[in-house]
Image (cartoon, helix red, strand yellow):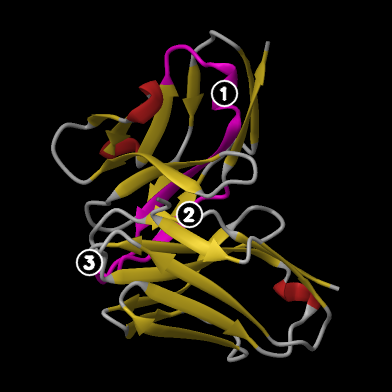
Amino acid sequence: DTAVSQTPKYLVTQMGNDKSIKCEQNLGHDTMYWYKQDSKKFLKIMFSYNNKELIINETVPNRFSPKSPDKAHLNLHINSLELGDSAVYFCASSQGAEGTQYFGPGTRLLVL
Amino acid sequence: AQSVTQPDIHITVSEGASLELRCNYSYGATPYLFWYVQSPGQGLQLLLKYFSGDTLVQGIKGFEAEFKRSQSSFNLRKPSVHWSDAAEYFCAVWGSGNTGKLIFGQGTTLQVKP
């Protein structure tokens, strides 16, 4: 069983569209994260949730909206996609903010 | 503000040779430090971490890292590299505030020559 899974693995879409990426963890963790990896492989945190409560909200355009329906899921919805949103998005989870973070395989988003 | 610098963008070593990947951090207090590896097309896997105690930490896949406070460094080492070690390596530090925020370095691409 995959510990942290993301769907879809690849996402190709047109500018202006709205899309969602889903993340699920079966580790029983209470904290989940979204990271963005740009074309230069630089990784930066976007959001984190602890027990469905938003803890970290970095300087991210408000077109990005995370949603945590329960502790095991953290989805990322992106409105009005732009070319600059093309990146790899990683979900991660940990037990508490001090726990080791386990990463999903990533979702490769390409905006045309 | 906390930051992590990995001075080497790209390193090539021969299979069987030793490896050292450099990492320097900027942090006011005692840092919590991590090394992650990203294989092509894959997610990140934790190699090892330093929280406190012994400054030489052992990780998975034969890797180790040494925390040197005087040099603000946390370099990753492996005595003998295997072809399967070719990957992207990221050093990271926990940001302040106990939020779990990881601050990553730019990454080092490791290429292994046969």
Tags 1 and 3 on a common chain: no
Seen at 42% across and 23% down, the residue is B77
Tags 2 and 3 on a common chain: no
Left or right for A77, reference B102: right
Q: Which residue is label 3 attached to?
A: A96
Q: Is residue B55 above or below residue A26?
A: above
Q: The C terminus of chain B lies in which quarter of the figure?
A: top right
Q: SS for tag 3?
A: loop
Residue B1 in sight from this viewpoint: no
Chain under callout 3 = A
Residue B99: in magenta span: yes
Seen at 72% across and 57% down, the residue is A39
Residue at the limit of the structure toward the front, as seen here? A1
Residue A63 at x, y percent in the picture: 62, 90
Q: The N terminus of chain B lies in which quarter of the figure?
A: bottom left
Chain under callout 2 = B
Q: Which residue is label 2 attached to?
A: B104
Q: Is residue B106 above or below residue A85?
A: above
